[in-house]
Amino acid sequence: MTFDLENQTEAIAATAAAHAVEVDGGKFPKQTIQALADAGMLGLVSATEVGGKGLGLPAAAHVVERIARECGSTAMVVCMHYCAVAVLEAHGPLDVRKAIAAGKHLTTLALSEVGSRSQFWVPLSTATPDGQDVRLAARKSFITSARNADSYVWSSKPTAGGELSTLWLVPRTTAGLRVADAGFDGIGLRGNDSSPVTAEDATIPATARIGDDGAGFGIMMGIVLSWFNVLSTAVSAGLMEAAVQRTAAHVTASRFEHAGSTIADLPTVRAYIARMRIDTDQTKALLGDTLAAIGAKRDDTMLRVLESKAAAGEAAARVTDLAMRVCGGAAFRKEVGIERMFRDARAALVMGPTVDVLYDFIGKAVCGLPLF
C-alpha cells in the first residue's frame, strides 16, 4: 500500500488538536505519539531497509510544521525524535533502528548540560571506561521526552580525553539515571516532558557508542545542527501559521454591534494581520530555501541553516505578539488558543543554539571567519 504523507499527516494533526489543551496543561502527548507509531511515522525518516518510510528532512519538516499548528509541545517531541533518528540512521545499531521503524521506540536528544548551558556542542559530562562498559556522569539540563523516550542520544567528553565529544545511545531505564522529580512547568511547551537528567555512575556497554570516540562534535555539526535548526524553524512556522489563521478568524467574526462592523473593518487591524502574514510567508520561504540548499549541497547551506532558526524565532515572537495585540482581551482566554501559541513561540529564542548565538555564527560566516 502506498504511503500517503498528506492524509496521514492531517490525521496526526487532528489527533494533536484534540489533545492540545490537556498537553498544554503538562500531559505528555501519548495519544499523538501512538498515532504516529500506528501510521509508521515514527519511522518516517528511517531507511526502507529497516522497515521505515525512507523519507528525509523535507518530509520531517512538513510533518512537524503541520503538527505545530495544533500543538507546539507535540511538535517539539516529534522534532527531537526525528533529530535523534537521523543520528541513529547514520551511526546507530540495527535493532534500535528497526524498532523505531516499527513504531516501537521513541528517542530524543540529550545534549544540553547545566555547565555549558545552550552551547550543546561542549559537553562537560564524562564517560569513564570500566572493562567492557563505560560509566556516565552528567548533569543534563533539559531532555525533551525525558520520562517517555525509550532512549537518549547522549553526549560526553571522549573517553580518551580531549576537548571534543563522543555520543552514546543510552536507554532511559539505565540504572544510575535520575530524572528530576518535578515535571516541566515553563512558560510554553508544557507538555514536551522536558526535564533535567542526572547520571551518577550510570553504566552502559562500550558498544553503545555512536560513531568513533571523539567524533561527537562532527556528528552534531554534520547532522544534529541542520536537522534541529530546520525542524525548530518548522515548529515556529506552524505556530505562526496557526496564529495568523486564528487571528483572522477572530477579527472577522467579532463585531462592534453598535456600529454594525467587525474588528476586521479597521484598517489598523488589517495592517497588523498583513505584517503577520508577511512574516509567516517569509519564514516558510526561508525554510524552503534552506531545505533546497541542503538537498543540493549548495555553498550557502550552512548560512541558510543558521539563518533559518534565528529568523524564525524572531518572527514567531513578533507574529504571536501581534496576535495577542489584535485579539485584545479575548486573546487572554485559553479557548481562543492565541495565548498558548504566544507562550510556545518563545522557546525558539532560547533553545540552543540561541538566536543570539546564531547571530554571532551568521556574522562569522558572512565575514569568512571560522564558527569555532
Image (spheres, rainbow, N blue to C red):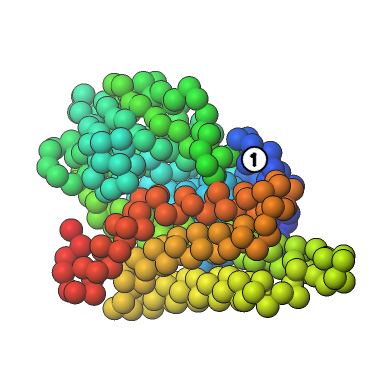
Name the image quarter holding residue 370.
bottom left
Q: Residue at x 31, y 71 (%)?
A: 303
Q: How many marks?
A: 1
Above-or-below relation of 53 to 32:
below
Provide the residue designation for mark 1.
23
Viewed as shown, does residue 258 lie left or right of 171? right
Q: Residue at x 72, y 53 (%)?
A: 330
Viewed as shown, does residue 246 lie left or right of 193? right
Above-or-below relation of 244 to 197:
below
As shown in the figure, which amino acid type bears the numbered disc 1?
Answer: Val
Q: Residue at x 71, y 68 (%)?
A: 248
x, y percentage for residue 142?
Answer: 41, 38
Does residue 2 appear anywhere in the picture? no
The foreground one among 135 and 333 is 333
Q: Quadrant of the C terminus?
A: bottom left
x, y percentage for residue 166?
Answer: 25, 43
x, y percentage for residue 349?
Answer: 42, 54
Above-or-below relation of 1 to 209:
below
Q: Residue at x 45, y 60 (%)?
A: 313
The foreground one among 32 and 187 is 187
Name the image quarter holding residue 223.
bottom left
Dot 1 lies on which element?
Answer: helix
Q: Quadrant of the N terminus?
A: bottom right
The foreground one among 323 and 155 is 323
Give the class, few, some or many, for how many residues have Cα within 10 Å of label 1's Cα (few <14, many ≥20): many
x, y percentage for residue 54?
Answer: 52, 62
Does residue 349 appear anywhere in the picture? yes
